[in-house]
Image (tube, rainbow, N blue to C red):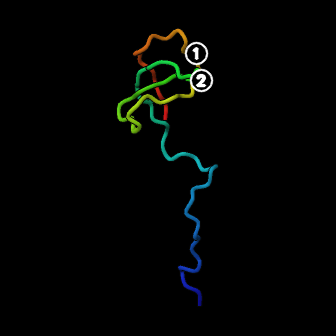
Amino acid sequence: MSSLKDKRSSRTEVPASAPSERPAEVVIGRFVGLGDDGAPLVDFPGNPAGAPRPALATARYDDVATGGSVALMF
């Protein structure tokens, strides 16, 4: 007779196609400037890096005032 342990899956990874259990979080951060590669740099409350981070953007930021508020989605 086989045990329950033998029948359990040893897979511990979540499949890449699995839907997220919660919606993306939106945080209000601030635009810090543009990086050398032109990517917008942003900072936000709770930033684990402790320094501005490059962001993927859906808009152009070359005319945005430094320090302006931005909505960030994680």
Of the 4 image quadrants, the one containing the N terminus is bottom right
User: Gap in Å between the C-alphas at discs 2 and 1?
Assistant: 13 Å
Quarter holding residue 66: top left
Mark 1 highlights which residue?
60
Q: Is residue 11 left or right of residue 30?
A: right
Q: Identify the residue at the far bottom of this view.
A: 1
Q: Which label belongs to residue 37?
A: 2
Residue drawn 39% across the image and 29% down it: 44
Residue drawn 64% across the image and 49% down it: 17
Q: Is residue 72 above or below residue 61?
A: below
Q: Earlier in the sequence, mark 2 or mark 1?
A: 2
Other-residue count near label 2 (Cα within 10 Å), few / some / many at <14 / 14–19 / ≥20: few
Residue drawn 39% across the image and 35% down it: 47
- Position in image of residue 9 (x %, y %): 59, 70
Residue drawn 53% across the image and 23% down it: 35
Other-residue count near label 1 (Cα within 10 Å), few / some / many at <14 / 14–19 / ≥20: few
Front-most of residues 42 and 17: 42
SS state under label 1? loop
Q: Identify the residue at the far left of this view.
A: 45
Q: Is residue 16 left or right of residue 40?
A: right
SS state under label 2? loop
Q: Is residue 57 above or below residue 3?
A: above
- Position in image of residue 23 (x %, y %): 49, 39
Q: Amino acid at mark 2?
A: Asp
- Position in image of residue 73 (x %, y %): 49, 31
Front-most of residues 19 and 48: 48
Q: Amino acid at mark 1?
A: Arg
Quarter holding residue 67: top left
Quarter holding residue 31: top left
- Position in image of residue 72 (x %, y %): 47, 28
Q: Nearer the viewer, mark 2 or mark 1?
A: 2
Q: Is residue 50 left or right of residue 64?
A: left
